[in-house]
Amino acid sequence: MLRYIGSRLIQVLITFVLFQTVVFFLLHAQPGDITDQFLGNPNIPPEARVQLRAQLGLDKPLPEQWLTYLKNFWTGDLGVSWTRYPRPVIDIIKETMPRTLVLFLSSTVVSFGVGFFLGRLLAWKRGALIEYPVTLASIFLYTVFTPWFALVMIWLFAYKAGWFPIGKFITVRLWRGSHVPYQANDVFNHMMLVTSIFVLLLGVVLFFTRNMAPIHRRRIRLLGFVGVTAAFFGYWILSPMGPWAGDIAWHMILPILTLTLVNFAGTMLLTRNSMLETLREDYILTARAKGLPENVIRDKHAARNALLPVVTSLIYSFAASIGGGIITETYFSWPGMGLILLEASTRSDIPLAIGALTFIGVLALLAHFAADIVYAFLDPRIRY
Amino acid sequence: MGATTRDIAARTQPESMAAMWRIRLGLWWRSLKESWVLFAENPIGLIGLGLLLFFAIMAIAHPILMNTVWERRIYDPVLGYDPMVAFHPAAPSARHLLGTDSLGRDVLSQLMHSTSSEFALGMVAAVTTVTIGTFIGAVSAYFGGIIDVIFMRLADLVIMIPTIPLLIVLGAMFDLNLVSLGLVLGLLSGFGGVTVIIKSQALAVNVKPYIEAARVAGGSDLHIIFRHIIPNLMPLSFLYMMFTATGAIFSEAVLSVFGLLNIRMSWGLMIHTTQSSGYLLDFQRWWLVFPAGLAITLLCSAFYLVGRAMDEVVNPRLRRR
């Protein structure tokens, strides 16, 4: 397993350098160069432009520029944002990356769970009256034009019903003034840390109960889940950060819900197809012949084998769901990488746009890498 | 003696050629009919086909309407303006069935005008994708070795590029229009996911006895690839044309909503206009956002539904027991 992870990691690194190269040549495929904007300015003589080109290293041969670009990236120097001068790009990305990560991770996990559950049910009930309406509705959600759907969600739940805020990361009114003891980013980072600890605890419960007799296991797992969840909420109620964290969480619900609704159908439709294929296998017939109860056949024999192709295509859909995340961020004014990328692109802030694009690439690659490892864990045949 | 052989050849060859041609057509027609029966079993595919037909009628009807009923000065999708209406955006009325936008242009006319360019974009992207994907898939399955390794690693790289962010940056740096956008999208999916899927199908075709027979009969590599492998990949390729069209239309709409494309009119641009004039969340004026948003959604799902129903035809394992 370790050797597998190592070889995958090297592949991921090579892919990333290739991706950076593509981005670099994209930059250079632009007509002219950065100094062209001084072309029409009579106060800047041609000699000054030549000097500027030399200073920026634009007169060097392309391979050398490429090496400099790579070196700068790996030493954390991504340049300075033009629209948010003089903030360095890496600084802005450090601030926005966790927000995007949280949105992406939570919506991916939730939509995968919901999609797998519903897809399993749909395949099991093939031919039932419910099949076509559910399939049609989920295809509608899957192909729905995300900006429009986000608007409808905002209008419905935030504007009309007033259950959620209309967008943004925090309620600015609450956080203004000297009585506020925290910075929003610190609260957010703390929320991430605490949530990951409790998720880890849930994993520990799952891990230690995996070999128990099924009758006890269900009871102990339920107890463990309820206990961990109660401890999680108890922590936030007791913590002085609680109300502030609650404000941020309140802003997170609607974007995550929207992204989940857009993403889950893909998993669901795939699970259905994959289940239908598995249900034709001989071992399902054998399980039936043994007289196993139907729900055991469905959950233990069919669904587990149907999971593999679903995970494979989940890996391939990461790039697409990051795209959906960007659109969602924009419409909910969620200040993550997507919003930054779009703002930078529409205002021609090239260093920031390139930095955001590169780090969205990093996110896609890391998600890809993690899913690969999960896949190797699920299917031992992969770990050659 | 020589004359007779030539005579016979002259007499029989066109006939046998014609016969071959007729047999091929007959076979093709029969398999098409069989596929249609399988396709029509599935209401999902029929719904998709119905939607596609609806949009096709919209696309065809627009130029006819412009030349007969609609006065160009008022109903032109880009430059039109209706001076007879006091305030724009105006609500739907008999004069403007879907109302007017904030610049006084007829929404229905814009909607119908954009349909044909959406189809064109989908076609450009789909044809590019499938041409590249099928050819590379077939070649790398047939030759294997270093060619296979290069293209498959390339596909791994391309799959991981987040398309929408890349297109956003491209739109900011270059002047993208519909054709260049279609080509970029086609290249991205052609070298990416589609190649991998088609190659796996080509591997299955590659070990069929008729490929070996063709090789024994002295067929060249190119002959085998173009006459034996690629025709057997066509159903799958056609299926992925549908999915590529869905992706292309979606991406175009996203880019135009953000105002990053250099085009005169599209469904996404209609929403962009609404946004820049400040009516985005004013759902009392639903005709500004809903027709365009719904049209994008429905055309995307139409292609997707047809593709999905075709999947059940092409892939026998999904058929009903």
Image (tube, coloured by chain):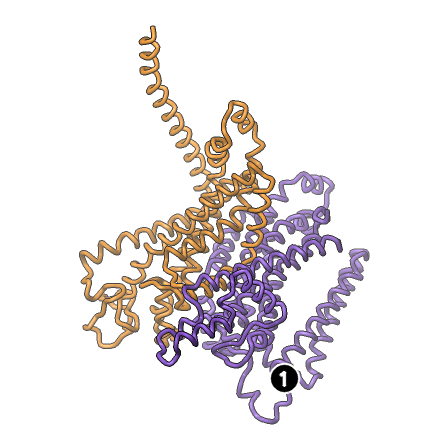
Chain colours: A purple, B orange
The image position of residue A183, as x and y in percent, is 62, 85
Q: What kind of residue is marked 1?
A: Pro
Q: Which of the pair B63/B232 is nearer the observer? A: B232
Q: Does any portion of residue A154 appear in the rendered image?
A: no
**Residue under numbered circle 1:** A243
Which secondary structure, mark 1? helix
The image position of residue B107, as x and y in percent, is 29, 65
Q: Is residue A164 left or right of residue A105?
A: left
Identify which residue is drawn at 33% across, 56% down: B115
Q: Which corner quadrant of the image does residue B301 belong to? A: bottom left
Q: Is residue B157 left or right of residue B307?
A: right
In the picture as drawn, the residue positioned furthest to the front comes out as A47
In the picture as drawn, the residue positioned furthest to the bottom comes out as A178
Identify which residue is drawn at 52% across, 59% down: A22
Q: How many marks?
A: 1
Q: Does any portion of residue B65 appear in the rendered image?
A: yes
Marked residue chain, label 1: A
The image position of residue A86, as x and y in percent, is 53, 81
Q: Is residue A67 left or right of residue A240?
A: left
Label 1: how many residues lie within 10 Å, few (<14), some (14-19) or many (20+)?
few
Q: Which corner quadrant of the image does residue A361 belong to? A: bottom right
Q: Which corner quadrant of the image does residue B13 belong to? A: top left
Q: Which of the pair B160/B64 is nearer the observer? A: B160
